[in-house]
Amino acid sequence: MSGPAATALAVALLAAVLVVAVWRPRGTPEAVAAIPAAALVVVSGLLSGPDALAEVTRLGPTVGFLAAVLVLAHLADVEGVFTWAGSLLRGSRGRRSSDVECREGDFSDAGTPLFRRVFGVAAVTTAVLSLDATIVLLTPVVVRSARRMRLAAAPAAFVCAHLANSASLLLPVSNLTNLLAVGATGLSFVDFAALMALPWVVVLAVEYAGLRWVFRRDLDRPTSDDRERQPLDEDRLDEDVPVPMFALVVLALTLAGFAAAAPLGIEPVWVAVAGVVVLGARSLATRATTPAAVVRAADPLFCLFVLALGIVVAAVGVHGLGGVLGGLVAPLGTGFLGLLAVAGLAALLANVVNNLPATLLLLAAFGPAPATATVLAMLIGVGVGPNLTYVGSLATLLWRRVMAAEGVPPTLRRFTVAGLVTTPAALVAGTAALWLVSGSP
């Protein structure tokens, strides 16, 4: 199949996959639409069988790494890493003094320290354990910590939402989009981190200032929501939460392994698997988790969704959109304005088709040997841009569901205001920082 009919069918299939992935009617897994769509792509001839297999082979190591990191985050959770983080977030108020102060109604200056602590923990969690850990594991801890301190959950929870995207710029392992793109740059783990360190810091500074301003009236004001004022049994994390030293050491060694593996030609997935084996052996031996829970943590259906989505996006690229995007990015160059245009286009595309398809489409449009700075500018766009709308990334959509499950659903108005205040400024500032460190003309 070729021509306008092929283009229309490819776009329609991608749209159907994204609609199901974004809205997930009745909790329908993303793969339910993606796998049949990928099969139809091959059966209809939009993409040949060998080409579809090549796409799966190309994405295989990345998806394997994603599964390993999801399991690693689950094991860190069952070993108490996020419970311990919750005690850090509450600081002195998470201990006995907090109970006294809460009963006496002393809430002065409690929200601002919590905001700062959440900001630091969310930035590190996203960078090291990926944005999924920040959304699925850290956000509930943050919400419950705020409720225990009788504070509005929104300021700190929005930090989790924004930093799950923005703080994922630092390392190749921080975001699936980074993993997809790093191969096109030819950068090692350390080189990637060195180039993205300044953009990461600058973007986080913009996020911090912007979110502080948006929530300036809510930070230190006790909540008036009766639901948030109720004590939570699971939040009686008490005074002496033990430091999960074994898990922290394994995570630190795994992160160091990512940096050491690249010069040796070892794929990051094997380092992540090694971390899973070491931490998993302890967790299974102590019955902190079960084999079934480990398999669920790997989220096989989501991994299949990513592979199937790659096939559908490849068909869209072959049948028209790839050429259009290629024509747009080819003349932009690697000067500041060119990089900013790439970041802006990536952000726009992420908010139209989601950041994962946007990354796949733009990588195809860049061609076989794109400039490193161009690829990194794209990552700033697909990393920061999704903070503007709910549909920008799957992580943001998942965060909205987590917030609803915790009884504090966010409003569209507040989400949009926070995005408008931070996202354009972060895109410009992050791109400027990238331009400075990349040595582009």
Image (cartoon, rainbow, N blue to C red):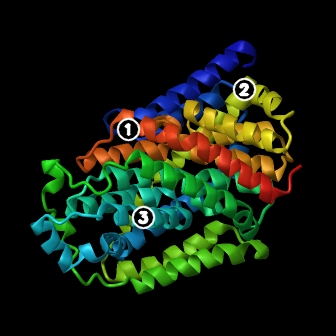
In terms of depth relative to the viewer, which is nearer, 21 or 377? Answer: 377
Q: Earlier in the sequence, mark 1 or mark 2?
A: 2
Q: Earlier in the sequence, mark 2 or mark 3?
A: 3
| Residue 308, above or below 113 | above
Q: Residue at x 44, y 60 (%)?
A: 133
| Residue 253, above or below 337 | below
Q: Amino acid at mark 3?
A: Arg
Q: Which residue is mark 3?
A: 116
Q: Name the quarter where the N terminus is drawn.
A: top right
Label at residue 321: 2
Tell me where residue 390 sits by quadrant: top left
Question: Few, some or many C-alpha atoms within 10 Å of disc 1 (few <14, some 14-19, many ≥20)?
Answer: some
* Left or right position of 422 against 99: right
Q: Earlier in the sequence, mark 1 or mark 3?
A: 3
In terms of depth relative to the viewer, which is nearer, 283 or 249? Answer: 249
In terms of depth relative to the viewer, which is nearer, 103 or 119? Answer: 103
* Left or right position of 178 against 420: right
Q: Amino acid at mark 1?
A: Arg
Question: Few, some or many C-alpha atoms within 10 Å of disc 3 (few <14, some 14-19, many ≥20)?
Answer: some
Q: Are marks 1 and 3 in contact (CB under 8 Å)?
A: no
Helix, strand or loop at mark 3 = helix
Query: Please, which residue is most extreme toward the top here?
Result: 4
Question: Where residue 402 sits in the image (x, y, percent)?
Answer: 33, 49
Q: Is residue 301 in view? A: no
Q: Residue at x 69, y 41 (%)?
A: 343
Q: Which residue is mark 1?
A: 414
In terms of depth relative to the viewer, which is nearer, 305 or 167? Answer: 167
Q: CA distance from mark 2 to mark 3?
A: 42 Å
Question: Where residue 318 sits in the image (x, y, percent)?
Answer: 75, 29
Q: Amino acid at mark 2?
A: Leu
Q: Are marks 1 and 2 in contact (CB under 8 Å)?
A: no
